[in-house]
Image (cartoon, rainbow, N blue to C red):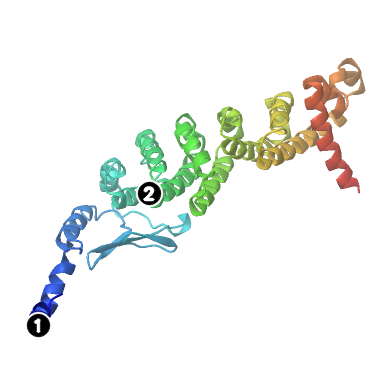
Amino acid sequence: MSESALKDLNTIPPTERKSESSSKASLTKPPVDNANENLEEWQKKKSCPTLVSPPVNGNQTVSVSSGVEIGNAEVEYIESENLSDLEDIGTCLKNLLSGLDSKDWVMVCDALNNVRRLSLFHKEAMLDMLGDVITFVAKSLKSPRSAVCKTAIMTSADIFSAYNDLIIDSLDPLLVQLLLKSSQDKRFVCEAAEKALIAMTIWISPVALLPKLQPYLKNRNPRIRAKAAMCFSRSVPRLGAEGIKTYGIDKLIQVAASQLSDQLPESREAARTLLLELQNVYEKFHDLMPAATVSEQPEMGSWENFCQSKLSPLSAQAVLRVTNIAREGLVS
């Protein structure tokens, strides 16, 4: 810079230099007026509890008990037991689908939490629109924004606990996304998805759920197979001994045997757990069976005979190795 230029710069009053600097900085500031406008439009839904606090310096904050900061918004996730009831159910129901389909991700999160509230406190009120709601929840599960995705996962868990088998015809889009999300690298998303899958196996009857899970046991993605196998293994014991017998031990043992040679250890461990459950149930009924029936039906004899009659030689050998090792461990 020339001496004359330096001289001119030094002669500028400090106040003017400060003003010039401020004008440059203002170019990068978010327009507060626009933020306030958007917030006012969003806050028209005053009848439904909001998760976004008033703007501070143009920024929006989503309030809650545990969360993460994304851009200018801090997102927190409310556990089911901490959700409050709705003030105006009618208005909330009226605005629910438009909120779920909004392009504003904060509004989507708020609508998802209202779905959770309706599921917990007024599940009958949302029953007629449940199919459409689940479609939008599944859409949110695909969102690249983690805040929307995790809130949708928590919403899925609350829907399972509230509606049980009533959602079985609409389960597929939720199930495939939860299996995918539970296999992701983002830990907080993965953990939430696993909790939702556990809730699914608790609240949806195994008779309805097992046929939905079976196709995913053969999915090309090994992680999806593993998560599906874990759900399958958790769900079968809920049938009870009589239910397992009615469902078909022969069908279940074939499913478990196919998972023993899977690529991931989670699948193999789920298969081992399931096989031990099936062995216990089989031997319980075998001990109660009349000797005449056993002699007439050799496949209803020992566990070893049963496995060999229902499986290929290699599969039967693998199954017996697993169950014998477990038994030897218990004995020792």
Res 256 quadrant in image: top right
Marks 2, 1: nearer the viewer: 1
Provide residue 138's location: percent of width, then percent of height. 41, 38
Provide residue 305's location: percent of width, then percent of height. 86, 24
Q: Secondary structure at mark 2?
A: loop
Three-letter code, disc 2: Arg
Disc 2 and disc 1: Cα gap in Å? Answer: 52 Å
Provide residue 182's location: percent of width, then percent of height. 53, 44
- Whether residue 285 appears in this view of the structure is no
The residue lying at 69 percent from left, 32 percent from top is 259
The residue lying at 18 percent from left, 68 percent from top is 25
With 209 as the anchor, is 50 left or right in this view? Answer: left
The residue lying at 83 percent from left, 23 percent from top is 308
- Per the image, the residue denoted by label 2 is 145
Res 237 quadrant in image: top right
Q: Residue furthest top?
A: 296
7 vs 166, nearest the viewer = 7
Numbered label tally: 2
